[in-house]
Image (spheres, helix red, strand yellow):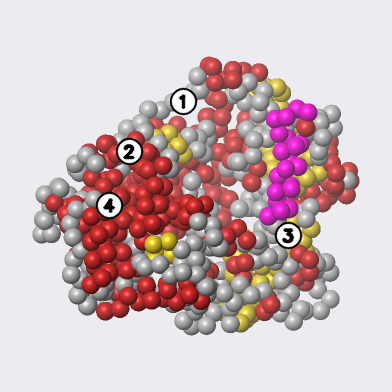
Amino acid sequence: MGAVLTSYVVADEIHLFPRGEALTTLLWLLKNRPAFPFCLMSATLSKPLVERLGQLLDARVIGELPKEDHARLNLNSRRLVVGWRPEPFDADTVLKLANGHQKVLVVVNTVQRAIDLGRSLADRIGREKVRVLHSRFYASDRKLAEDVVMEALGKDEAERTRGPRVVVATQVIEAGLDVSADVLATELAPASTLVQRWGRCARWGGEGRVIVAPPPTEAVYPYAREKGGPELIERTRTWLEENARDPVQVSRTMEQEFVDFAHGESDQKWLDDMERSLGERTGLVGKAFLDGGYTVGGALVRHVVQARLLVHGRPDQIGDPFSREGFGVAVGVLKGFLRKAGRPVESGAGDGDAEDEPVSLELPEPPEWIAKTPVWDEGAEGRQSAADTPSRWVEIKPKVLPPVVALNPALARYDPFFGLELGHAGEPVSERYWAPQVDRNRDKQLLSYVSETLEEHIRRALKVLDKSPWLLPRLLAVEDELERWLGWPQGLLAETVRASIVLHDMGKLAPGWQKEAKRIQRSLGKPASRWLAHTDSRPGDARFPPHALAGAAYSTGVASALDSRIGQSDRVPDMPSPRRVLVTAVATHHSAGMRETRVGRDFLLDQPARKEAMRLLQLFNLPGSVPDVRDGETIERHLVDASGMRLGKIHPWKEAVALAVVSRMLRLADGESQELARQEKPQGA
């Protein structure tokens, strides 16, 4: 968040942002941050929506590309026509379209439709002339499919003579892949989506042809499940039937009329409700800061309604389920499938109708089990995603769809060419494709540590801060504007960042932490320097006591000295407080939330540790002193409190912005400092 709030924000394809979540949050951020430049881009927004957003953000609307950009993109030589076909297309239809054309792209709306059509085409012309691309591949197979598609439809003319003649894809082709076909056949979708899709036809100039047809099913999934989706699809269909039964030339004017007709009414409804939504966003953002987690992430960014599906015949042998490759499957789709498989799961809000995945489940005999989910013992350390092996796997209950599901391989099939299919009895997933292990060697390497004292760690982190182009140099580029917005004197923000780096590990000076560090070093046969901040590794049996809360408590002396630079007192919080920002950044450095604000006896610094802390403050030129923290003392009054945001108060939000910036600088400098330590002092040296 700190990066977004202090950057030149460029948001592309904003029509793809969920309007009630990510788009509203983005608009709220742009309205309530310092006056930094931004650019929002989309070629598929209705005119009323564009004009209203321009007014809301006091932004200039650029409706047309400059002539030089038209020339550079070869748009002047582009000749594209779009036609409506009332009947769904099949493999024979696609092959007729491909006759006489070098490359054909077919975009369909569901994974199963892509697999079925791709399989039918491969049976007719061979796999070497067809490629299927969708979201349900294992990572290596998805990468191979994308490489082949880029070879076939990429910008390199020499490569375009090779590869498949026909590519069948889902929505994954709409953004992210710079490809172009001579002919595009696409299933009916919202107008903005269709405009996005036909941007993949004659993309770099020349002549292209687009055919839009309805899907085989009456309802247009997945759009029929979205709020207002059926009405939007119907208006899109009406325009195409009235204007494109005979092919129509594509132009910017034509595209705008198409989008305005289909989306104008729903856009106006959303605009009418937007002011209220922006007002409510303040409270949601405040709740996110207070909770320190992702409890309101869905409301702010996106409601993720997917389950993680692992295909495996012996889930009890999986171990950590998050170390295995799986598939993200829409909750509605998976519930519909399990219902057909004899394990009906109760529908929930937002599931919609899930009958968009035609499956065959005429099994010769029912499998022993259909779907299982992992269960962790109560008290397992950390979040479930950080836990190791679940205690057991149990069959899912009819009323609950858990976030992780293991599916019996007898109920699916997997082919590296076609991907994962749900159903299709008699062709179970081969054991070689049972939830492959994820390669985590790189992650393990990044988690290795080399020993360093607290002074060495601070020096390295400050060096990273000063030298890394994405840290202090980037902050200095926006510091003046940001400090004017905060009401802080020049240089105070950077000083707060430096103070957070010096202070964030002060809690490690406590006797209990130092005792454990020495034990680990000796167990490794390594020397145990005094005042260690890191040991040479982080063994699984390490028993380091928490230190962030203690570090925050012992940072209050410096923090209060920073407050004095703006003339702020504890009783009159008349502007954002660097004291609260600094203490909160240190306290939440390792976790976004705080369960405890009282410092226990085990976290207190003894006299030698306090003396070392004071030496470090003086060494790194920090104001203030090391406070005398008492057993049971709370730091609550020193913390950023975003609850006032719910009442529309601006000071808590400004404080939250400063906190986001300081926290980001601290976390990046801290993390990169160990990389610097590994370079200067390799492990084992």
What is the magenta range? 139-158
Tag 2 residue: 476
Specify which label sits upstream in the sequence, 1 or 4.
Answer: 1
Amino acid carrying label 2: it is Leu
Tag 4 residue: 620
Residue for point 74% across, 74% down:
313
Query: Would you call the spot at circle 4 few (<14 residues within 10 Å), some (14-19), or many (20 or more)?
Result: some
Q: Secondary structure at mark 2?
A: helix
Q: Secondary structure at mark 1?
A: loop
For residue 683, which quarter of the picture? bottom right
Q: Nearer the viewer, mark 2 or mark 1?
A: 2
**Badge 1 vs badge 3, beta-carbon distance below 8 Å:** no
Query: Would you call the spot at circle 3 few (<14 residues within 10 Å), some (14-19), or many (20 or more)?
Result: many
Q: Secondary structure at mark 4?
A: loop
Tally the marks.
4
Amino acid carrying label 3: it is Leu
Specify which label sits upstream in the sequence, 2 or 4.
Answer: 2
Specify which label sits upstream in the sequence, 4 or 3.
Answer: 3
Tag 1 residue: 63
Amino acid carrying label 1: it is Gly
**Badge 1 vs badge 4, beta-carbon distance below 8 Å:** no
Label 2 to label 4: alpha-carbon separation = 20 Å
Residue for point 52% across, 59% down:
304
The percent coordinates of residue 223 (x first, y second) are 58, 50
Tag 3 residue: 420
Query: Would you call the spot at circle 1 few (<14 residues within 10 Å), some (14-19), or many (20 or more)?
Result: few
Q: Is residue 8 visible?
A: yes
**Badge 2 vs badge 1, beta-carbon distance below 8 Å:** no
